[in-house]
Amino acid sequence: MVGHPSVTILLLLLCLCSPSQVPAEEPADEQQRELNPEESQQTLAFLAKQLTANFDAIHTWQGTYLYSRESLFHRSRFEPPVWKTTYCLFPFWLDQRQDQLRVNYTQTEKPDELDQLQPPIKVGSPLNAQWIMVKGEECLELSEKRFGSVYGFPDEIQKQIGGGRILYRKWKSELERDGRFFDPRKKVLGTAAGSFARTPEMYAKVLSGAEGREKQEKFSKRVTIKERKLKDGNKQLIVKIEYNPAKPNGTPRFRQVTYDSRFSFNPVKYESLYGTDPDRIQTFSYKNVDGISLPEKVVLEDFKPMPSGKSELTSRLTYTLIDSKLNQPIDQDQFKIKSFNLHYGERMLDRTKNSAFIQGTEGLVPAEEFQYKK
């Protein structure tokens, strides 16, 4: 169904004029200078403090990201490559104080970009899944795949039940290796290594001399920071770190991150470089909610070196926040097994304790005790 044109136009105007949405375009420079080593150490410590404060201010966060993946697909060496795009939705519920996260993965059809009121259309897919990660080393995964026999359940019971979904309890490390899994703390609020504060905090400590004079002198030559003052009174801090080349006498590698005072000093651009050629570029735009900067759009582009010597864009991942509630109560049942609404006869396999269960009329029962009733 297509939304009413006047409503659509009104929605677009509200999005453009809302004071809570702050664009992250490159501003005009007013002044730029390189910081000395002492200033660099103090600046890194300051960045770590600012980034930690913004992250810690997020007590609970629930919402949905629309995710798109554009990949360059080479059909054959005789045909030009083509771009293919897939879409999915990531509804999530994050309780940082309790270290609890629930997230769903749902494939969708391409959203209608002309009709802002039309939500993406969900698609039934065996890849669709639901996950719960709570404090500790265990997590839960319910896949939409339809399975037959699975080791751990009595053969007679499996014959009676047939196929069906299986809920897995597994180790958190298994889940984190799943390319479909979305943790906003590592995808949009930080990196796989941790929060955005981790790197500035680590280098601030080294440059302070806390880890020895030799290490301090070594890394002071690898870290350069430029301060860019903007015409509106804000500023950007551009931190560039040099890493060892992949091979002796090889091309030097760099990571350059631009932090912006308009967004609680969160990064607006991340660049991984081989010499001057990009390997990965990530850009961020934010919305301000009660003084907290939330990532509204994150774009990650990967490049591959070509025989010509230039880098070619090979994939683009985009996360777009389409709804959000910050620091509002979350129903704690979202983080419990009962929220999966298992049907009678559906199974649970606990890999952490090597045990199996089947959903009965009153809840999960050990597989060996289950009596199937039609």
Image: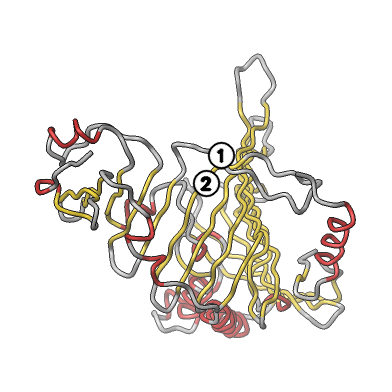
Sequence-wise, which precedes: disc 1 or disc 2?
Answer: 2
Residue sitting farthest toward the left:
368
- Residue receiving disc 1: 123
User: How many residues crowd around disc 1 within 10 Å: few (fewer than 14), some, or many (20 or more)?
Assistant: few
- Label tally: 2
Out of 152 and 197, give the one closest to the viewer.
152
Q: Which mark is residue 227?
A: none
Q: Nearer the viewer, residue 261 or 211?
A: 261
The crowding category of the residue bearing disc 2, from other C-alpha atoms within 10 Å (few below 14, some 14 to 19, many at least 20), is many
Q: Residue at x 40, y 47 (%)?
A: 178
Q: Amino acid at mark 1?
A: Val
Contact, CB < 8 Å: mark 1 with mark 2? yes
Image quarter (top left, top right, bottom left or bottom right) of the C terminus: top left
272 relative position to 181: left or right: right
Residue 95, percent from left and from top? 45, 73
Q: Is residue 348 above or below residue 306?
A: below
Residue found 34% across the figure and 64% down from its top: 336
Instruction: Quadrant for residue 171, please give it.
Output: bottom left
Q: Is residue 113 above or below residue 63?
A: above
Query: Who's the residue at 81% across and 72% down the image?
Result: 18
Q: Which residue has dot 2 on it?
A: 106
Mark 2 lies on a secondary structure that is: strand
Question: Eyeballing the image, is 121 above or below 196?
Answer: above
Q: Up-down: is 137 above or below 288?
A: above
Q: Quadrant of the N terminus?
A: top right
Identify which residue, 351 or 275, lies in the foreground.
Answer: 351
Q: Is residue 133 left or right of residue 345?
A: right
- The x and y percentages for residue 373 are 19, 41
Percent across and percent down for residue 67 are 60, 49
| Three-letter amino acid code at the position of disc 2 | Thr
